[in-house]
Amino acid sequence: MSEPSGGGPDASADLLGLTDAADRLDGLAEMADVMGDAAGADRFRDAAARARLRAMSILDD
């Protein structure tokens, strides 16, 4: 688990992991759009947005 404040290596790893996951989820959303799955695309985009919000909260700590 990462440190709640002060950053540190765990926080940096969490931040990178979350931003990578958000990018992958955006890619999956695009693929779902191409396949005509609007509901799936929305779910992927929502998950990507939540990952980015979590990453921003890590930066604020």
Image: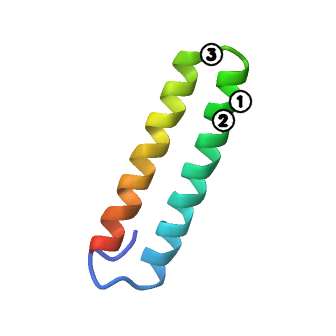
Mark 3 vs 1, N-terminal side:
1
Q: Which residue is mark 2?
A: 28
Q: Quadrant of residue 16?
A: bottom right
- Where disc 2 sits, the SS reads helix
Q: Position of residue 1 (x, y in %)?
A: 40, 68
Relative to residue 48, is residue 14 depicted above or below? below
Image mark for residue 39: none
Q: Amino acid at mark 3?
A: Asp
- The answer for how far apart the CA atoms under marks 3 and 1 are is 9 Å
Q: On the rendered structure, is 13 left or right of 51?
A: right
Q: Residue furthest top?
A: 36
In percent of width and height, residue 17 lies at: 55, 62
- The answer to whether marks 2 and 3 mark residues whose Cβ atoms lie closer than 8 Å is no
Which amino acid type is marked by label 1?
Met
Q: Which residue is identified by label 3? A: 37
Picture residue at 28% right of the left edge, 72% below the top: 60
**Which badge, 2 or 3, is on the more N-terminal residue?**
2
Q: Which residue is mark 1?
A: 31
| Rendering coords of residue 9 (x, y %) | 48, 83
Q: Secondary structure at mark 3?
A: loop
Quadrant assignment, res 26: top right
Q: Position of residue 55 (x, y in %)?
A: 41, 62
Residue at left offset 66%, top offset 35%:
28
Is 21 drawn above or below residue 58 in the view shown?
above
Kindly identify the residue that appears in the image at 48 percent across and 77 percent down: 12
Give the Cα distance between marks 2 and 1: 5 Å
In the image, 21: left or right of 1? Answer: right
Between 36 and 19, the one lying in front of the other is 36
